[in-house]
């Protein structure tokens, strides 16, 4: 593992598919949650096409690249397309993001110390699959820059999404990553304290168990900023 400060990176762009739009306040909130729960040297960066409202004291802005920005999710236009994120696997990301970085989705709640998750020794870690047929979930990726370059270099905008879908690897970028890398990569699981709201918390009706560090609201049913005051007090306590 490198000793340089970790870069924490997230994405925000205007989606073409009409799904829930992320706002600058969601980026700022994530940066604050990370700062509270990861008190180690780090950069917090947002790759975006609209930096308005981002707190310059919390967030470094990286202009959104156009690569694969117009590709649709192979499962249909109602699903998000995140093929832009595949460029994280390009070796030149070392110049932009540093030698080691973690990419995480905005729709999450940080509930505990992140250091055990991010101080792993492996050169590449992804959240374990939350879809039974898909190896990995793209909500969080930790990697040394340049690790697994084949994910970027072997991607073809026509053939690759089709191959991943035919292999029952669900999603856009995560489907291709799962297909290209196959089983066997290091992952985070519920035992590490990384949970999914839909997958592990009975659609939010249960409180996270002791030891939970991070809850992702993957899917399109609910977001942490939609929390009802009485139903999800634990969300309100941490998501600020």
Image: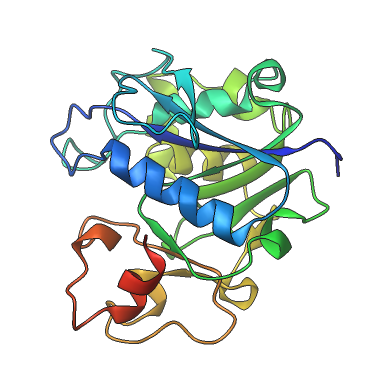
Q: Measuring 60% from the left and 29% from the top, which residue is drawn there?
A: 151
Which residue occupies the extreme left position in the image? 18
Measured as percent of width and height from the top left, residue 73 is found at 29, 34
Measured as percent of width and height from the top left, residue 85 is found at 47, 30
**The C terminus lies in which quarter of the figure?**
bottom left
Residue 163 visible (yes or no): yes
Q: Quadrant of residue 63?
A: top left
Q: Measuring 47% from the left and 23% from the top, which residue is drawn there?
A: 61
Look at the picture and state if 107 lies above or below 124: below
Task: Count how many numbered circles sit on residues in the image.
Answer: 0
**The N terminus lies in which quarter of the figure?**
top right
Give 127 or 101, whichever is nearer the viewer.
101
Give 37 or 174, whichever is nearer the viewer.
37
Q: Measuring 43% from the left and 49% from the top, which residue is drawn there?
A: 30
Look at the picture and state if 74 lies above or below 205: above
Measured as percent of width and height from the top left, residue 75 is found at 25, 41
Colouring mode (rainbow / by chain / secondary structure / one colour)? rainbow
Q: Quadrant of residue 192?
A: bottom right
Q: Quadrant of residue 9?
A: top right
| In this picture, residue 201 sits left or right of residue 42 | left
Look at the picture and state if 231 lies above or below 110: below
Q: Measuring 77% from the left and 56% from the top, which residue is drawn there?
A: 120
Residue 171 visible (yes or no): no
Measured as percent of width and height from the top left, residue 139 is found at 46, 50
Which residue occupies the extreme front position in the image? 57
Look at the picture and state if 194 lies above or below 94: below
């Amino acid at each position: 593992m490198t000793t340089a400060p970790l870069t924490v990176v997230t994405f925000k762009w205007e989606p073409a598919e009409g799904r829930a739009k992320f706002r600058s306040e969601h980026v700022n909130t994530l940066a604050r949650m990370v700062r509270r729960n990861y008190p180690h040297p780090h950069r917090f960066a947002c790759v975006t096409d609209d930096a308005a409202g981002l707190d310059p004291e919390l967030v470094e802005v990286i202009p959104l690249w156009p690569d694969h920005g117009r590709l649709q999710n192979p499962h249909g236009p109602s699903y998000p397309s995140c093929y832009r994120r595949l460029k994280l696997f390009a070796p030149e990301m070392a110049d932009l993001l540093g030698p080691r970085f973690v990419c995480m989705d905005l729709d999450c709640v940080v509930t505990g110390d992140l250091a055990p998750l991010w101080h792993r020794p492996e050169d590449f870690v992804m959240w374990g699959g939350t879809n039974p047929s898909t190896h990995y979930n793209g909500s969080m990726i930790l990697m040394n820059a340049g690790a697994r370059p084949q994910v970027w270099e072997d991607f073809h905008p026509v053939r690759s999404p089709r191959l991943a879908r035919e292999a029952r690897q669900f999603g856009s970028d995560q489907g291709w990553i799962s297909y290209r890398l196959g089983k066997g990569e290091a992952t985070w699981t519920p035992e590490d304290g990384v949970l999914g709201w839909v997958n592990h918390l009975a659609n939010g009706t249960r409180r996270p168990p002791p030891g939970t560090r991070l809850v992702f609201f993957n899917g399109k049913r609910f977001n942490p900023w939609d929390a009802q005051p009485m139903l999800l007090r634990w969300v309100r306590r941490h998501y600020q």
